Image (tube, rainbow, N blue to C red):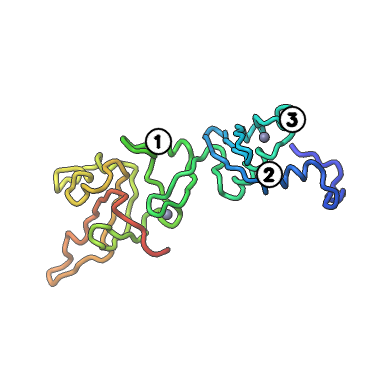
Amino acid sequence: MKTIASPKAPLPVSTPDHLEERSRRARSEPMSVLSLGDGLYEVESASEHTYLVDLEAGRCTCPDHVFRDVRCKHVRRVAMEITEGRTPPPGEVALACHDCGETVFVDENVAASRYRDGADAPGPFYCADHAIAPGDTVRDRETGSRLTVVDVSEYRADAVEIRAADCTVAEYETNEAYDPNVPVVAAVYPHATVKRNGVVPSSLTVYTFPRTRLERVGSP
Ligand SMILES: [Zn+2]
Ligand SMILES: [Zn+2]
């Protein structure tokens, strides 16, 4: 709820008050912000004090907030870092793209649901450049072949059977080097092979891969 007392009042550009000073310090002072989840952020100041910020409640454990009840520089800094994309907003967590390591913000619940057995971090997750969807061209890291994605499943490689081979996608011999607990991607080779006697049926087959075996190529 915002109330503007005097919309025509000039901005106090030449008379910096305490508010502006806090805003300036929020931007320029060295502080490190760590997202803790649940809308909480840990802010370490240059003086090595550590404060806890609850962004949505606008609260901080620093004296400026606790005793003077002001929107302190720590709360401001957290808000700035979110606006600039350097810190995840409440409800999201920062994770690394599997292929390039770039930071991606992922919904906390989605991240929790993608926690894999024995993994240090959930995933795999991908940045916009490395995410794949049906229709995208990918490269098979094992053979170098290009394929077209037809489906990105939520099922894991150790839960999907390859009927012809009587084993799971994860157990298939050329997949053994890849995580068994990543999603399965279905893909086709882009061109059917046509011989004198017609289409070679195997060239129309949909193949399944552990997600991490495929990498996106080109841009759409
Ligand atoms: Zn503070
Ligand atoms: Zn990436």
Q: Secondary structure at mark 1?
A: helix
Kindly identify which residue carries mark 1.
113
Q: Amino acid at mark 3?
A: Asp
**Which residue type does callout 2 highlight?**
Ala
Give the spatial CA distance, label 2 vs label 3.
16 Å
Question: Which residue is pictured at 55% across the width and 44% down the height?
Answer: 87
Residue extending farthest front: 47
- Residue 160 x/y as whole percent: 24, 42
Sequence-wise first label, 2 or 3: 2
Distance, label 3 to label 1, CA atoms, is 38 Å
Q: Nearer the viewer, mark 2 or mark 1?
A: 2
Residue at image position (59%, 38%) is 44
Mark 2 and mark 1: span between their CA atoms? Answer: 35 Å
Q: Amino acid at mark 1?
A: Ser
Instruction: Describe residue 76's horizontal placement relative to residue 19 as left or right.
Output: left
Q: Residue furthest bottom?
A: 196
Along the viewing direction, whichever of 13 and 176 lies nearer the viewer:
13
- The foreground one among 1 and 71 is 71
x and y percentages locating residue 86 in the rendered image:
56, 48
Q: Within 10 angstroms of label 3, few (less than 14), some, or many (20 or more) residues?
A: few
Residue at 70%, 27% (x, y): give it. Answer: 66
Instruction: Report the residue marked by disc 2.
Output: 26
* Quadrant of res 20: top right
Q: Earlier in the sequence, mark 3 or mark 1?
A: 3
User: Given this view, does label 2 or label 3 mark the residue nearer the observer?
Assistant: 2
Residue ID at (20%, 43%): 168
**How many numbered markers are drawn?**
3
Q: Is residue 51 left or right of residue 176?
A: right
Q: To which quarter of the image does residue 114 belong? A: top left
Q: Which mark is residue 69?
A: 3
